[in-house]
Amino acid sequence: MAKGAKPLLNFAVYLMVRLMVGVIQAIPYRAGLALADGLAWLAYRLDRRHRMVAHENLAFAFPDTMGDHVPGGAKRRDAMVRATLRHFCRLVIEMIWLPRLFQVGSWKRHIDLGENPAPLVRLLLSGRPMLLATGHFGNWEMAGYMLGLLGFKTFAIARVLDNPYLESFLRRFRQRTGQTILAKKGDFDQIQGVLGAGGILATLADQDAGPKGQFVPFFNRPASTHKALALMALEYDTPVVVVGLAKLGEPLRYRLEVEEILEPADFKNEPASVAALTTRYTAALERMIRRHPEQYFWLHRRWKHQPPVRKPKKVEATAAA
């Protein structure tokens, strides 16, 4: 690519995205959802690579109901792939409409706080540092937006987009209600500072961590998981709150699900405390996803890396004397 061409391409992509956002904001919300369903249908037809990734992931995750050996398993798996695409295409429409629908006086129409939000509220008001662990599930962007709207100062770890114009646009949206975005790479000192000062830090805890990650069980397979969350929890005595926002219906109806609150003191005396804590919060994420499997992003390669296969030691034959 010629010098100067990439910035122009990035700006052109940014203008196209802004145009699409403007169009979606100009049409009725229901029409936007219909558009999302059409995009999901198109993505299913055209994006074979991600469709196959989702099929493979679901076959491993639900072998008893969606495995190839189960009668009707492939058909159920295909329906789940379509439902997943529909959920995430609708999620894009929801995010564009969120500032208009989700405000201080109207948030209760859109968020059900669940059966027992009291433990989470007590932690939010306690002044202790807190780690919010969620995944590519439900509407993870809405959690930080909601907490900021309610007056809680939060920080979220996110990867910086390659397109600087889109990165700036998305950052302004994410920080609209007071949330601060910290870069996954480059802001580690600030991340530590947040916990040291008793702040609230949110992170997506279901991303592949490469061959050197902590391998823990996740839907019947070892999943490489980042160790940083457990290490920070143990170092700063920070509770890990496994939380998600699960879609209930329209328009924009979600339920807060606090799946588990993990205290680091319960793990410090274990010989492999990082592995134990990572296993526990990953299992909690799995339970949430099993209740709403169509709301999980099965299209990403969560199990991209697997533990290295240990080769059996060679036994040297000893000649008989």
Image: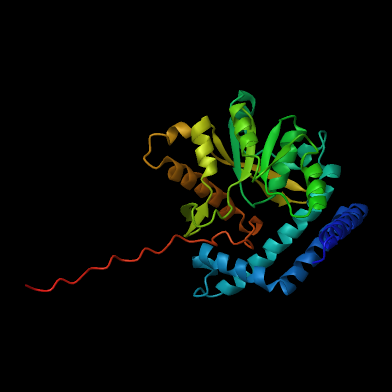
Seen at 86% across and 56% down, the residue is 11
Q: Which colour scheme is used?
A: rainbow
Specify the quadrant of the image occupied by residue 85: bottom right
Q: Nearer the viewer, residue 74 or 23?
A: 23
Residue 9 coordinates in the image, percent (x, y): 84, 61
Left or right for 178, reference 76 = right
Residue farthest to the right? 26
Residue 317, compared with residue 136, is above or below; it is below
Residue that lies at the very extreme toward the front in this rendered image:
3
Instruction: Tell me which residue sits at (82%, 62%) in the image.
Output: 3
Q: How many labels does the image show?
A: 0
Residue in the image at 15% along x and 71% along y: 318
Counting from the top left corner in percent of width and height, residue 14 is at 85, 56
Please provide percent x and percent y for residue 186. 65, 43
User: Measured along the vertical axis of the image, is residue 20 above or below residue 144?
Assistant: below
Asked whether the viewer can see residue 249, the reply is yes
Tell me if I can see residue 263 in this picture: no
Q: Where is residue 70 in the image (x, y as percent from the top left)?
A: 51, 73
Say which quadrant the N terminus sits in: bottom right
Q: Is residue 142 or residue 318 the one in the foreground?
A: 318
Q: Quadrant of the C terminus?
A: bottom left
Seen in the image, is 267 located left or right of residue 53?
A: left
Image position of 148 (left or right of 235): right
